[in-house]
Image (tube, rainbow, N blue to C red):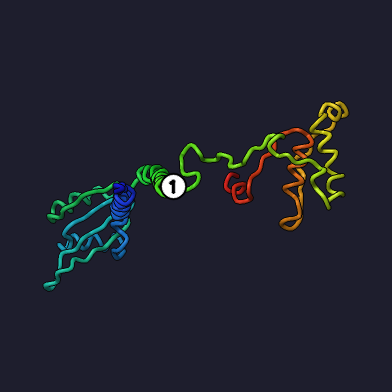
Amino acid sequence: MTKRRFSYIPIVLLLFLSVLAIHRNAFAVFSAAERIPYSDFKKMIQQNMVEEVIMDSTSIKAILKPEGGQKVKKSITTIKIEDPDLIKELIAHNVKFSAISNSGWSQGLFFLWFIPMIFFLIMMSRMRRGAPGAGLMSIGKSRANLYSDKDTGVTCDDVAGVDEAKEELKEVIDYLQNPQKYQRLGGKIPKGVLLVGPTGTGKTLLAKAVAGEAKVPFFSIGGSGFVEMF
């Protein structure tokens, strides 16, 4: 009986989502509260309507005392103003107060490990499924098949019906065989030759024939593999 392998992917993903939720809640403490002017906030303190105050670098959140037997505590927010008397008033009216940090550095640090974590989960998932190219060392690795001249076994004599294309490729074959002849005249090898035509018209066979005639290696790669590589 084959023993089932225990997967850590769901545990890592659950842990990541939990940390993400905690982080979002820590910096969204002011989002659901009603916003009021700072002067109204000061009046509420003086009227003993405020139970607790939470401050960050730019805002102040106040949790109000329940009124008329209400069980749900109402919250309000206001912009933070440099007020040296605020702490004294909070102490005088027995209001609990605290502060939280929502600095840009902290959020930047979060996203610094957020992207590598996503990359790690994707790679682990691909490796677990055994997907092609799943290994970390195979990223960007060519999937081309290499054939030496003896492996192709194809020459221009084996290709029929494309005499015009063969004639145009003779110069490429000659350059591959005798590059010095063209280099003395300042010639440069072309970046490539585009063979266009429907499937089954002999494009790959013609490319093999060029490699076979010039006695150079032949690389074969599918379109999907080429797109994935580049």
Q: What residue is at 55 percent from the left and 40 percent from the top?
A: 140
Residue 160: x and y in percent read 82, 50
Q: Nearer the viewer, residue 115 or 69?
A: 115
Residue 179: x and y in percent read 81, 29
Residue 80 in view of the camera: no
Q: Nearer the viewer, residue 210 or 52?
A: 210
Three-letter code for the amino acid on which mark 1 is drawn: Gly
Q: What residue is at 46 percent from the left and 40 percent from the top?
A: 135
Relative side of 2 to 69, left or right: right
Residue 64 in view of the camera: yes
Against 66, residue 182 (above or below) is above
Looking at the rendered structure, the secondary structure element under dot 1 is loop
Against 48, residue 137 (above or below) is above
Report which residue position mark 1 lands on.
130
Q: Based on the displayed image, in which of its 4 quarters is residue 171 positioned?
A: top right
Q: What residue is at 79 percent from the left and 33 percent from the top?
A: 176
Residue 137: x and y in percent read 48, 36
Relative side of 187 to 100, left or right: right
Q: Residues within 10 Å of mark 1 (few under 14, many from 20)?
A: few
Q: How many marks?
A: 1
